[in-house]
Amino acid sequence: MAKRSVAHKSWLPEANDPATSFPLTHLPYGAFEADGQRHLCVAIGAHLLDLHHCAESGLLPASLVAPCKAPVLNPLMSLGPREWTLLRQTLTDLLHNSAKPAKRARVEEALHSIAGATLYKPVEIPNYTDFYASIHHATRVGSLFRPDSPLLPNYKHVPIGYHGRASSVVPSGAPVLRPHGQTRPSHPGKEPSFGPSRTLDFELELAFYVGQSNPLGTPVPIARAAEHLFGVSLLNDWSARDIQAWEYQPLGPFLGKNFATTLSPWVTPMAALEPFRAPAASRPKGDPRPLPYLRNAVDQRQGALDLQFEVFLSTQISRENGLAPFRISQSSTRDLYWTPAQFVAHHTSNGCNLQVGDILATGTISGPAVSSAGCLLELTRNGAEPLKLPTGEMRAFLEDGDEIILSGYGEVPGQPRIGLGDCRATILPARH
């Protein structure tokens, strides 16, 4: 792990630990409970810095006082990139090793321990769009159901996406009830059945928050699209595969997807991801170039991200035996076929008006190897090849009591490592 340079050092010792997820260069936004109210915060080392307290105590510029006293990030996001930068620089100065002792003392009054804090969703989410940006996921899933033609003709030309449901986006740690639904008849001529899903799955994704809206009827050009994004969070887009398989034709996912989507409580600002910028994924020879509205030289050169992800599974038996969660997958955003800016440019190309707080998710993030698959549908070949766990248990799909934990981080030479925070949930039995 990279050592902290003097430029990256905080007067908080925990923020300089190479193993921390929250160094001075990160400062992810969150929301926590303080005196019965919801306060915005940033994470630094093992602490939360209460932005509401900072605003009230005169530590922030006047233009940032009202938005930092709000219970959600939307008012701050709506101010735009210049104010985002101003707040980030102000907080960095307050927490930097060079901060004067008198100012440190005032900042210390706004610090709380992360341990034991009650965290909330820090953003009011008006809309949720789910893309399908991993060509490896699309190809592997397509080969299960269309072995002769895994990828549909449009995939390499258009960022495929669909509208999800924002009302069922829940914070990390909230349990997920196994959903009921209608499923395919067991034999031709039989009636479909209705009951709890038998093939419940997770999907490892990254969510991008829209920080700048666009007027209805006004597309966002690809050259400006990245400016509309505020930050990212880990996201688990749960899927009831049996419900989804019966309902998705001809209109696409519905009840098999919208019963729950779990979101990490931390919003990593795009500014913190600058060291982890990467070129867009190289397209194989013969693949079409993106159409002009999706093509930009700067975006192709540095519009992707180099972030790593891991998925862990904990079962009731493993917890009873004191075993740590089992890692079942590793993947990277380097393998995505489309960039975040292309999401924005395509989403608005017909004049659709994005709103502050909207989330645009990547879709399942999978790599070229089966071990880098971001869901059980791929890892087990739709249940045909169940995973054998160290406890001796087998998993084709998720069972009641299973906990899925998504973890992500950025790590490149010469830069402090940052962690995106866990995104976790336990499956509870379906309601009677």
Image (cartoon, helix red, strand yellow):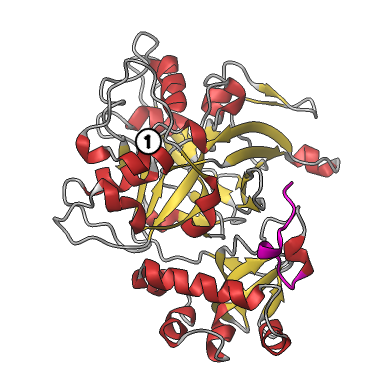
Residue 254 seen anywhere in this rendered image of the structure: no
- The percent coordinates of residue 54 (x first, y second) are 57, 84
Q: Residue furthest left?
A: 217
Say if 353 sits above or below 374 in the image. Answer: below
The residues colored magenta run 1-12
**Relative to 270, is 288 on the left or the right?**
left
Nearest the eye: 2 or 321: 2
- Which of 372 and 199 lies nearest the eye of the viewer? 372
Using the image, determine if residue 263 lies above or below residue 141: below
The residue lying at 54 percent from left, 32 percent from top is: 375
| SS assignment for the magenta stretch, majority | loop
Q: Is residue 250 above or below residue 225?
A: above
Q: Is 349 above or below relative to 13?
A: above
Q: Position of residue 386 (x, y in %)?
A: 64, 21
Q: Residue 395: x and y, percent? A: 65, 27
Q: Quadrant of residue 77?
A: bottom left
Q: Which residue occupies 66% across, 43% down? A: 413
Amino acid type shown at disc 1: Trp
User: x%, y% of residue 167?
Assistant: 40, 58
Q: Is residue 263 left or right of residue 338?
A: right
Residue 7 located within the stretch drawn in magenta: yes
Disc 1: which residue: 338
Foreground of the two, 368 or 102? 102
Residue at image location 65% in from the left, 64% down from the top: 24
Residue shown at 71% from the left, 73% from the top = 97
